[in-house]
Amino acid sequence: MAGGRIDPWSSEQSQDYARIIEQFGLGSVDVSSLPNPGMLHRRGIVFAHRDLDVVLGCMKRSEPFGVLTGLMPSGRMHLGHSMVIDQVKWFQEQGADITVTVADLEALATRDTSLETGRKTAIEEYIMNYAALGLDPENTNVYFQSSRPEVQRLAFTLGRRTNLSEFEAIYGFEGDTNLAHVQAPLVQVGDIIHPQLEEFGGLRPIVVPVGIDQDPHLRLTRGIAGKTHWFNVKPRSKGGVTIALSVQDGNQNALGMIGGKVDVESRKTLFNRIMAAISPLGYSDLIANHKHGTLVIPGANIADIASIRMCLLALEREMGGMGLMPPCSTYHRFAVGLTGDKMSSSQPETTIFMDESFEDLERKIKRSFSGGQPTIEEHRRIGGDCSKDVAFQYLQFFFERDDNALLEIKSEYESGRMLAGEMKQVCIDKAWEWLQGLSERREMWSDRLDEFLAPDAL
Ligand code: TRP
């Protein structure tokens, strides 16, 4: 985390979540605001978000919204990857449609993985396990970056809205940075934005659940989407909301400028269209300043901004603009690696793979970092430390889905009644049950994976 940056390619990881929320202006997740909160929400593992309230509003009103998630088709799928899928599944149960990016271009550019190998890994390793984890193929669409030209086109057109200085600020790039690391984030912007295109479901909020390390991509995408907007909606300090025109190269005529000057007559026509666009929201009082290109709604408040924006993005599209919503996002904490280091598929002892054998599972958990005391006598007296105990954390993050059972385990351990070896055994048993369930469901889905693929991925 050099210089307080988050580096999506680093092997280091900050655990200072409070600072991250503060520094990057994330929202804290309020579990009581969620319908049927999932296990990761109830346990505080999904800890932060951007604009999640927009998505929660859609759930409440049964309006459409989507989830976008992506995977690098390299290496084997392990526990760390399953956390996002847990959340995707929750969103799907709350009514979301699901788009899954196979980042085969990114893997080609940054890991030298051929498109063929990437495809095979994506389907046999990742999509197979997504199915086994319970994603519903009915409204899930898996696509490949390399075979979706719309995504690549967006990467190019939206690339005009950023520059090297911004990449330097967000990612810490320097003169010797490989340009694959410039291209990959731009394609990822295309991934995140494209479900809103008419041919992929149209204008609706898209939420991207990720680990905190991916937030730089979301900041980039949100910034870029904001720069394309024709209408900016902001709260006014005196109360009310201001809509301000954003005159740019391509929209001057549409926004009532002729020959570089404001044309009051066309501004009036435009403002009438704006008023018609937001009329379903029912504001009676609107103050227009045609020359400045602002429209104040004194009766609106911050809570109305999302709906006003939505109406104006639809209008922008009608008028020929892109009308892109900045993506919403949620962030989960990382489970520590078994050894106490970062969990990573390139270091097999730090994690558990989705098809781990019993022998490997048992060995890895038995050797895992423990929160027990050095001697049994001391352990009985002081008790174990769940915050350090990897076996306990894996029960909490993955294997023990029953909150009461987990609390029981915690109090047994902390009171010293349960020993470190016993905690590990509970974890081994639960993990094996979980892995066997997965394996059975992989079997069930193995010849039906096509159902998850979008038409352009078949
Ligand atoms: N960059 C991501 C990774 O390293 C993969 C990815 C590509 C992605 N496009 C995405 C993730 C869109 C989330 C959303 O794993």
Image (cartoon, rainbow, N blue to C red):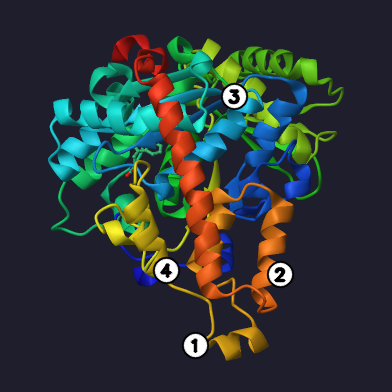
Nearer-N-terminus badge (4/3) = 4
What is the crowding at mark 2: few (fewer than 14 residues within 10 Å), some, or many (at least 20)? Answer: some
Could you tell whether 152 is left or right of 335 in the image?
left
Q: Percent position (x, y) of residue 200?
A: 45, 14
- Establish if 47 lies above or below 275: below
- Mark in front: 2 vs 3: 2
- The quarter of the rendered structure image containing the C terminus is top left
Report which residue position mark 1 lands on.
374
Badge 2 marks a residue whose secondary structure is: helix
Report which residue position mark 4 lands on.
4
Gap between marks 4 and 3 measured at Cα: 34 Å
Residues marked 2 and 1 touching at CB (< 8 Å) = no
- Establish if 351 lies above or below 82: below
Q: Which mark is residue 292?
A: none
Report which residue position mark 2 lands on.
411
Q: The disc labelled 1 sits on which kind of residue? A: Pro
Gap between marks 4 and 2 measured at Cα: 37 Å
Which residue is located at x 40 percent, y 70 percent? Answer: 340
Gap between marks 2 and 1 measured at Cα: 19 Å
- The quarter of the rendered structure image containing the N terminus is bottom left
Residue 433 seen anywhere in this rendered image of the structure: yes
Q: The disc labelled 3 sits on which kind of residue? A: Ala
Q: The disc labelled 4 sits on which kind of residue? A: Gly
Gap between marks 3 and 1 measured at Cα: 48 Å
Nearer-N-terminus badge (4/2) = 4
Q: The disc labelled 2 sits on which kind of residue? A: Ser
